[in-house]
Image (spheres, rainbow, N blue to C red):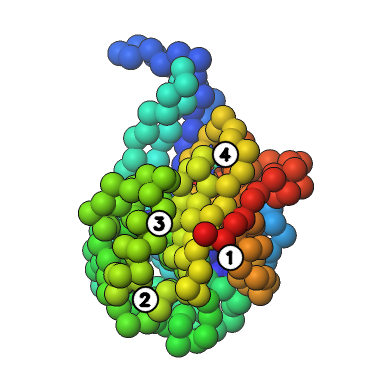
Amino acid sequence: MILTVTMNPAIDTAYHLDHLAIDDVNRVAPRKTAGGKGLNVSRVLRQLGDDVLATGLSGGHMGAYMGELMDGDGIAHDFTPIAGETRVCISILHEGNQTELLESGPEVSADELAAFLDRFGELVVKVDCVTISGSLPKGVPADCYAGMVATASAAGVPVLLDTSGASLDAALAAEAKPTLVKPNLTEINDLLGTAFTPDDLPRLRETLAADARFAGIPWVVVSMGAAGSVAFHEGRAYRATSTPIEAVNATGSGDSTIAGFAHAVAAGMGAEDVLRYGNTCGKLNAMDPRTGHLVMEKWDEVFNDIQVVEL
Ligand code: ADP
């Protein structure tokens, strides 16, 4: 069983339009999904055949509706109720553009957070792997994920952390280390104050090796979109690449990559297969118009095309 954490989930609502008429009426057919990065991870894990339990915070009518959507996707869930209303995020896909309207989400009280963290402590001991994805809602301190990593680590459960900004900073500064972090190139450059490109991997490697914040993290993976990814694991560096494709919709490719990693880590696979699973899932998501959904018919073709080399 893999536990996925989504602290600030959403009802993702997508509208597809041939043309967005500004200052006019647009008639639309919505597609609604239980959203937030951890729920994208959950859906992909279901496609991979894993048992998943989704957790986090949810509230109000939208929270109840999110539960129904997760039921519809076959995702078991155990969210802690909060008084605030779960947010709605709108994505308008028009003329090759993606215009997004993202609510910031509800404020979480100290009692609600404490109830969630208690429940997280109960759930974590029952699972093989934990994924923690996305940003924290208002009212939750930036070191929340660092504490959850410590809980998982004390229970001996691998924990994959996919976040950025202050919550990633806090997790990197903490004593208990996540099993895997997966910043994308923009996020790692923001963190390091650098401007590395996929052509600068030796310098990226040196910079990470000299940075004490990354010491003791078994897997540091930097994803680079169509350029694949680079992974630092047990003193070795690996580069994963594949035949380039024109992405249909790469939103959620990072979340799909985390699902692939979690699947492989929970199954005890070796380094090269962990990378093959992650990169296959990221690419198969980029080939599908839906977010957090793999084109499974192309699994063998894409999996066999991923090249993993040691640098
Ligand atoms: P994030 O969504 O976190 O920014 P990336 O955009 O780096 O993550 O994508 C994650 C992974 O998905 C990449 O490492 C790669 O394996 C795969 N991927 C994403 N976009 C493409 C693409 N256009 N072609 C091939 N693979 C892709």
On whether ligand 1 comes within 8 Å of the CB at mark 4, the answer is: yes
Name the kind of residue labelled 2 in the image.
Ala
Label 2 or label 3, whichever comes before in sequence order: 3
Amino acid, disc 3: Pro
Give whichever of 26, 130 is nearer the camera: 130
> Which SS class for mark 1?
helix
Q: Which residue is mark 3?
A: 202
Q: Is residue 225 above or below residue 5?
A: above
Q: Is residue 130 visible?
A: yes
Q: CA distance from mark 1 to mark 4?
A: 19 Å
Q: Residue at x 33, y 48 (%)?
A: 196
**Residue at image point 44% right, 56% down:** 222
Q: Is residue 168 left or right of residue 2?
A: left
- Per the model, the C-alpha gap separating discs 3 and 1 is 27 Å
Instruction: Rate crowding at label 2 as few (under 14), some (14 to 19) or many (20 or more) other CA atoms within 10 Å.
Output: few
From the image, state whether disc 2 or disc 3 is nearer to you.
Answer: 3
- Label 3, secondary structure: give it: helix
Asked which secondary structure carries label 2, the reply is loop
229 relative to 119, above or below: above
Within-10-Å neighbours for mark 3: few <14, some 14–19, many 20+: few
Give the residue at mark 1. Answer: 262
- Name the residue carrying label 2: 215
Q: Secondary structure at mark 4?
A: helix
Residue 289, given in percent of the width and then of the height, sits at: 58, 33
